[in-house]
Amino acid sequence: MIKEFEIIKCTVDNTFETIDKVVTEVPLTIVINNIEYITIMCTPLYMEELAIGFLFNEGILKSKEDIKNMKLVKDKNIIFYIDLKENINYSILDKNRVITSGSKGSLYFKSMDFMKEKKFDNNIKIHKNEIMNTMKEFFNKSKIFEETGGVHSVLLKSKEIEVFREDIGRHNAIDKAIGYLILNNLNVRDFIIYVSGRLSSEMVSKISKSGICFAISRACPTSLSLNLARNMNMTLIGFSRGNRFNVYSGSERIDFND
C-alpha cells in the first residue's frame, strides 16, 4: 500500500536527497453482468468492499441478496466482476465512467431532490464523552496516513461493531466501510460515521443516501451541507477535536449530561 521513491527535499537551510513514502494508487474496473460500468482510482485495499459500497450508494444494488456472484481478478488490470439478479434496474447504468481519487464519485446533483424529501427518524442516542473519546481513537488509527499523509479515513461505529477503512479518495473510504456492512448483512441505520475530512454537501449527500443519520468530523461543514442536514433531521458534528465539538444539527441524538 506504500511505495518508496527517491526525492529531493528542500528547506530554508538545506537541500538533500532522501527516500519518501507515497501511498499506492491503482485503477479498479467494475464489470456488471459483463458490462464494463466504471473505473475507480483507489488504494488497493478492501477493493471488493469498495465496489459493493459504491454500487449500493449509486442505487444499483440494495442488499447482498441482489448479488448472484462476484469475483476480484488481479492481473495486468484489476477488475471486479459482479453478476446481479434480474430485478436490477439497468436503465440507471451510465457506462464507462472514470472516477478519480478526488472525485465525488456519484450522481450528486440528481440526489438533491431525494435529500429535500428525506427525513431521518433514527432513535440513535450517544453521550458527548463517547463522541470525544471515539474521535481521539479514530485520529490515531491510520498507519498509512502516519507514514504518507496521503489517505482519508472513515470509522463506522454501532453499539457492538466498529469498521475502519481508509483510501486516497474520501468517497472511496465511505464506500469501503458501507460495503463491509452490506456484505455482512448489517443494518446501515444502526451506525454513526466518523470522517477525517470536511463535511461538504457531497459528503452529506453520500452519507444520507446510505441511510446513516449521524456524521462526525474533525473538520468543518459547509453552509449547504448544514442546511441539507437540518432539512433531513440529520445529526452533523464538526471540529471534534480533543474535548470539544460543534453541533450543527440533530442535537436531540446527543446526551449532554455530565
Image (cartoon, helix red, strand yellow):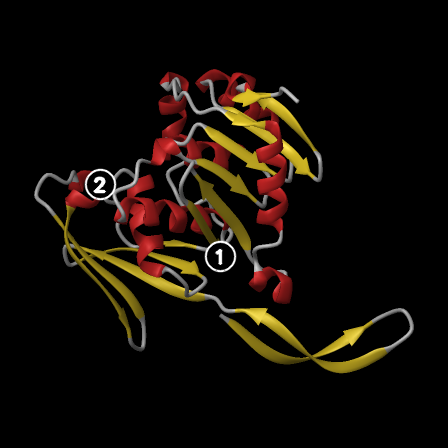
Mark 1 Cα-neighbour bin, 10 Å: few <14, some 14–19, many ≥20: many
Residue 109 drawn above or below residue 67: above
Which of the numbered marks, if any, corresponds to residue 121? none
Snapshot quadrant of residue 213 = top left
Q: Where does residue 176 sit, x and y in percent of width and height?
A: 39, 51
Q: Is residue 94 left or right of residue 218?
A: left
Residue type, mark 2 in image: Ser
Residue 37 percent across, percent down from the top left: 26, 53
Which residue lies at the image location 51% right of the left edge and 52% below the top edge?
A: 102
Secondary structure at badge 1 equals strand
> Is 239 placed left or right of 177 in the picture?
right
Q: Secondary structure at mark 2?
A: loop
> Which residue sits at x=63%, y=60%?
149
Find residue 167 and name its label.
Answer: 1
Q: Give above or below for 229 relative to 35.
A: above
Looking at the rendered structure, the kind of residue marked 1 is Asp
Q: Measured from the top left, where is residue 156 in percent x and y?
A: 45, 42
Please give the residue where the numbered disc 2 appears in the rendered image.
63
For marks 2 and 1 on the same chain, the one whose residue lies earlier in the sequence: 2
**Residue at the location (23% across, 44% down)?**
93
